[in-house]
Amino acid sequence: MEKRANVPVVTKEGCDYAQAWARGNRGRKTMKTYRYDLHVHTRETSGCGRVPARRVVDLYREIGYHGLVITDHYLPEFFARLGRRPWPEKVARFLAGYRAALARGREVGLRVFFGLELRFADDPLDYLIYGIDEDFLLAYPELLTADLATLHDLAKAGGFLVYQAHPFRSGSSPAPPELLDGVEVYNGNPRHDSRNHLALAFARRHGLRMSSGSDFHQPEDLGRGGIEVTEELIRPEELVTVLRRQDFHALLGLATVISRE
Ligand SMILES: [Zn+2]
Ligand SMILES: [Zn+2]
């Protein structure tokens, strides 16, 4: 019998997370569930990441997650710093965190998916991308100098999803909703006030999909967000389908950390 408490309800003015995903908790106590974090950084690739990818994987496994999406910062500065190296070499450098996580995940049995937290050269907003792959990065270096409208078209054609990360954190503002597939309505990073309740209201107002992620950079961020599903996600397409259909419960806060006996 699982000892995990129900997902805690975060209630702020005018918003109730319990209702946002309420699909009834009946039957959940005996049903096997699987947890995945949708927003995780590694030290290898994200300048602000403090934890090496292998350790990230081990930590998530310890708290009972089944997988995570590595969403390292895909930034013009990252690639500019690499100078005039050939593009494939630059992409390989970017993939260092993901590849280390993937290798460790295979060793210990934690599923590792590839994603991005992308920022364009002349747009201060952050976009989380799910379902994209390494081949796309190799084939399309222009991604860094594109814009949200172009990304939106590419995502439609390529079958990946674009969510705005923490749109109401200071320095951010909501992007045009018609160019988004979804919104990160719960960002668990404890060093920022992401004003998640406003993100939830924004997503509801525009009928956008919702996501939750820890925005893991440091050990204290572990398991502060993510999703819980009733079927194990093996292939990247399965993750995309679950996100597309909103077929999950969102994990909010540290409930998942205290759940493991
Ligand atoms: Zn960061
Ligand atoms: Zn992030």
Image (cartoon, grey):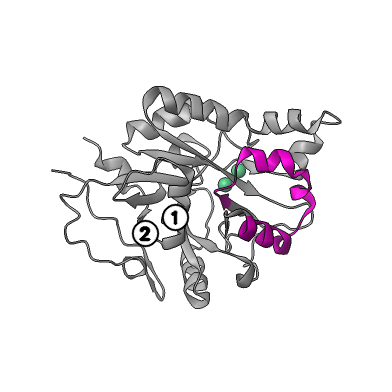
Residue farthest to the front, as pictured: 157
Q: Quadrant of residue 26?
A: bottom left
Q: For this rendering, which residue is in front, 12 or 74?
A: 74
Closer to us: mark 2 or mark 1? Answer: 1
Contact, CB < 8 Å: mark 2 with mark 1?
Answer: yes
Q: Is residue 43 visible?
A: no
Give the residue type that dot 2 points to. Answer: Asp
**Residue under pointer 1:** 241
Q: Is residue 34 above or below residue 261?
A: below
Left or right position of 175 against 186: right
The residue tagged with tag 1: helix, strand or loop? helix
**Residue under pointer 2:** 247
Report the predominant secondary structure element of the magenta stretch: helix
Residue stretch rendered in magenta on the structure: 129-157
Q: Is residue 94 above or below residue 38?
A: above
User: Picture coordinates of residue 46 (x, y %)?
Assistant: 63, 36
For the point 25% across and 37% down, which residue is it? 260
For the point 62% across and 67% down, which residue is it? 174
Residue farthest to the top, as pictured: 107
